Image (cartoon, grey):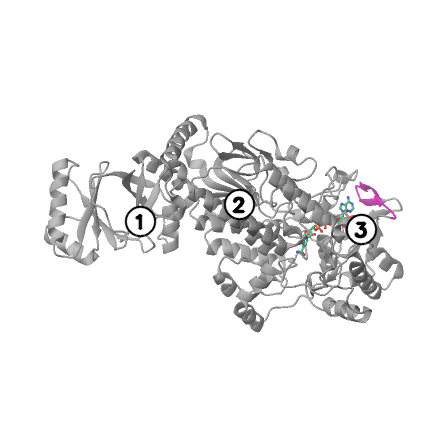
Amino acid sequence: MNDYLSTLTLEAPLDRDGLRRLAIHACLDLHQVRWLRSFVAMDGKRMLCWYQARDAESVRLVLRQQGSAGAGVWPVAVTDVAGSESLDSSVGCMVVELPLSSPDADEVASLTAGISAALRGSGAVLRRTFLSSRDARLMGVVEAGNPGTVVERLDAAGILTASLWECAAFDPRPPKLFESHAASKVRELDRDAESFGAAAPVAASEWFDAIVIGAGLSGMCALERFTRMGLSVRVFESGSDVGGVWYWNRYPGARVDSEVHTYGFSFSDELIRDWNWQELFAAQPEISGYLRHVADRFDLRRHIQFDTRVASAAYDDHHACWMIETDTGERARARYLIMAAGTLSAPQLPDYPGMRDFTGESCHTADWPESGIDLRGKRVGVVGTGASGVQVIQTIAAEVDHLTVFQRTPTYCIPQRNRPLTEADLRRIREDWGQILKTCRESYGGFIHTFDPRSGLRVSAEEREAKFEELWRKSGFAFWFGNFADLMMNSEVNSHACEFLRNKIRARVHDPDTARKLLPDHPFGTKRVPLECGYYETYNRSNVTLVDLRETPIERVTPSGILTSRQAHPLDVIVYATGFDAGTGSITRIDVRGADGVSLEDKWRDGPTTFLGLLVSGFPNLFIVNGPHNAAALCNAGRCIDQNVDWIARCIERMCGQGIRRVVPAPAAEAEWTQHVYDVAEASVLAAMKNSWFFGANTPGKPQRVNIYAAGASEYRKQCEAVANSGFTGLEFS
Ligand code: NAP
């Protein structure tokens, strides 16, 4: 290995962390380039990096890749080494840059001797020189130098200095991530690098360590973490800004169902200090604003390509990398592919005849136009009464002329009890931040609510009723995740909770027939529970009609409205709140092909198979965040994303550190996890009602297989930790 210096031009001065990230970014294990340390020019606009590499070409290649990664950096010159003195990395150093009239050996030798003589007795020592043959410069690495003294001494000796570079003030040790490989590995990588260049039609500039699909919460969290690890990352996002579901779901009333401070990112304490949440359950505009703030604050946008949908992803086994192609034909490669496309982001429209003939306006809640839809004074129909439908219905009822709700399955809604967050609330949240995160980490759903450890059958009927009432009066998912510990496992406890909630509906809805239609008959929690604000009272309004599709199904959509088996409902606007092809839809809508060319859609034809919901056998280096078989569906998404990304990062760190190029779950480990997911669901109350997106039942043609890990987020975390702590048992590394 030789040493090389390279100057990089910065578009703008960077802070310490930015510089560090930039320097270590450039080190791809494929090219065997190690970053040693960096120096910054006095003008703050240029940076000098010192690398160890096999040859100058590797450094150039890496820098070209780096330059195109949007970092605003490009190589100016790579200089060859002309000295071999070792340097004690524990002491400070600087670089002096001296112009040469010609890069001839005599001039270099005399200048080198001149610098050494000039510095004698100053405490600064010239340790090493690098020669730039391209632009006739000599770079001298001076150890323990005081910049002022060095310049003075060189001036006094009549030696002209072009610029002075100070060692960037960060840990100069090479990051662990880039430990050197065994010689055999290097030879293998060499061969690979050559054949890669010859075979691949993709420019080196489109090569990244990791490609992330989606710039919602998951993608942003992965991006922040991976860039902090020093990986080069490109995120592809179909929207025009960050946010994912929060970008697309702009329907009236869209609002988070986690206490919002527990939902945001936890990777920086500054965020919880800087951002003043306005409401306990923030609405879509506030959350979108927060996510844009995070993107700006952590300079994430430069790694994200917006308005770009990934159409296909194919694994290239020979080069151990993924090749993606976008819908506009652009291609890019990366060692790791991260699916962060969202568990609920592939909208599911019904297929009623005549939908295209409707002459009014219609849209899915997850595809709401940015300019909005003016619903005032209109006759509006809402199809679907899941969490999205409930939020739309309770929000728009007062402004429309008439609202017709088309309900297929009634579901249990519990009061959200939203409120503004005061200064005192925010102070308390900031003070308790560590404890809040710990509680979420350890709780079943990743929320701040924790189960009552008692069984719902070990208390008297009065005590049980009192507990239900107390929880019902609390905000958020207290009634779900703060309930008796066996609520989700014991059908008798669950049926008591159901009856309590049915009584609440009966008490709130005036018309007994409407109340009857709103009464669910499935176990509580077997569909994700919507949080409501006055939802049931909406049905007491004279301008709201509830149509029970189980009694009078929709026959078709007509040009002027919806026709059920009983009557025509004239409408100006139809809102489809009909949910998503959940868990797998956002992944299989991309043509993903694994090592042997098999498509993921085919592999999952009978239902998803995964290891920990994070990896899939036959699909090396593909990681899924909050996908199927994950605890995410019952979880506070922000907290589950943290955990998923952390686990993936640990796995990648191990691979980088040990020169491992491939990871894939062993088929037996995948089969075992998948069976475990089924077993857990069968042992819970979920088994009693499979008509939900938890089982893919809402997507025509989809196999009815459980999508979610029903043992909860804390148990899921434990299982993942156990795998990581055991050296990633179940995974095959090569
Ligand atoms: P969903 O829970 O799947 O609800 C879809 C609704 O549409 C159901 O009522 C469904 O009836 C009905 N539906 C589907 N196809 C239909 C058809 N062909 N004809 C008539 N009705 C039909 O979808 P979602 O409400 O969008 O919520 C999905 C998930 O997103 C939630 O469970 C939650 O995790 C998340 N979300 C969260 C929030 C929040 O508060 N933060 C808000 C919105 C969404 P059936 O039940 O009979 O299938």
Q: CA distance from mark 1 to mark 2?
A: 34 Å
Q: Which mark is residue 38?
A: 1
Q: Residues within 10 Å of mark 3 (few under 14, many from 20)?
A: some
Residue 575 in sight here = no
Q: Circle 1 — which element?
A: strand
Q: Is residue 51 above or below residue 424?
A: above
| Residue sitting nearer the eye, 74 or 656 | 656
Q: Which mark is residue 409?
A: 3
Q: Secondary structure at mark 3?
A: loop
Crowding at mark 1 (Cα within 10 Å: few <14, some 14-19, many 20+): many
What amino acid is labelled 2 in the image? Phe
Disc 1 and disc 3 in contact, CB within 8 angstroms: no
Work out how far the residue at label 3 is from the one at label 2, CA to CA, in angstroms.
42 Å
Relative depth, front residue between 228 and 134: 228
Answer whether residue 556 is magenta in the image. yes
In the rendered structure, find residue 728 and report the number of the disc placed on it. 2
Label 1, label 3: how far apart the Cα atoms are: 62 Å
